[in-house]
Image (cartoon, grey):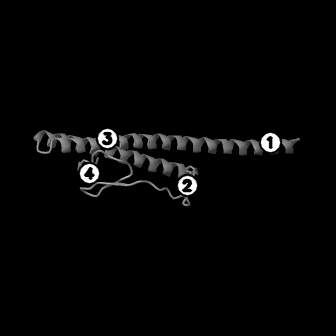
Amino acid sequence: MGEKKGTFKKWKEKVNEKVTTLSNKTSFAVDRSKLRKQIGVIEEEIKVLKQEIGEIVNLNRNSLFSVSMVNYQLMQIEAKEKAVALLEQEIEELNDRSKAAGVEEELIGESTDIIEVTQTFICANCNEFYDESKNFCEECGYKMI
């Protein structure tokens, strides 16, 4: 009878260990996902700001107002890029903590066999490449369409 109790206790300890590991993996994965989502939102905001700069430059080429507006947009972009850098640093710290806890991030669905073909758009003015069609170049403000 004592042998069965010892076997059950070992089994229970293993189950508890696996549950704890799974819980840690889930917690780290959720935290990483939240941070990556925040980064995605901020990067989308940066994209919109760059497009607005292109529109300002194209519509008001010689206006002093456009210079101050572009400078304002550039300051916003800089602040958002700093926020992205901080979030990426948080992800790195989270990765370090997960490694210290023995929980590595698993990369799901990564394959080097698949080659994705995409259409590329190039600004005629500065030769900047884009994966999608743009009204204005985000780098130089040139009207692309």
Q: Secondary structure at mark 4?
A: loop
Q: Estimate the spatial distance between the alpha carbons at disc 4 and disc 1, rounded to whole Å.
A: 66 Å
Q: Most extreme residue toward the front, as rendered?
A: 145
Q: Nearer the viewer, residue 67 or 142?
A: 142
Instruction: Name the residue tied to disc 1.
Output: 8
Q: Which mark lies nearer to you, 4 or 1?
A: 4
Q: Estimate the spatial distance between the alpha carbons at disc 2 and disc 1, rounded to whole Å.
A: 39 Å
Disc 1 residue crowd, few under 14, some 14–19, many 20+, Cα 10 Å: few
Q: Estimate the spatial distance between the alpha carbons at disc 2 and disc 4, rounded to whole Å.
A: 31 Å
Of the two numbered discs 1 and 3 on the same chain, state the one appearing first in sequence: 1
Q: Position of residue 104 (x, y in %)?
A: 56, 52
Q: Which mark lies nearer to you, 2 or 1?
A: 2
Q: Which mark lies nearer to you, 2 or 4?
A: 4
Q: Secondary structure at mark 3?
A: helix
Q: Estimate the spatial distance between the alpha carbons at disc 1 and disc 3, rounded to whole Å.
A: 60 Å
Task: Describe residue 36's horizontal placement relative to residue 66 as left or right.
Answer: right
Q: Residue at x 67, y 45 (%)?
A: 18
Of the two numbered discs 3 and 4 on the same chain, state the one appearing first in sequence: 3
Q: Residue at x 48, y 47 (%)?
A: 94
Of the two numbered discs 3 and 2 on the same chain, state the one appearing first in sequence: 3
Which amino acid does the dot numbered 2 rest on?
Answer: Glu
Q: Residue at x 26, y 40 (%)?
A: 52
Q: Secondary structure at mark 2?
A: loop
Q: Which mark is residue 139?
A: 4
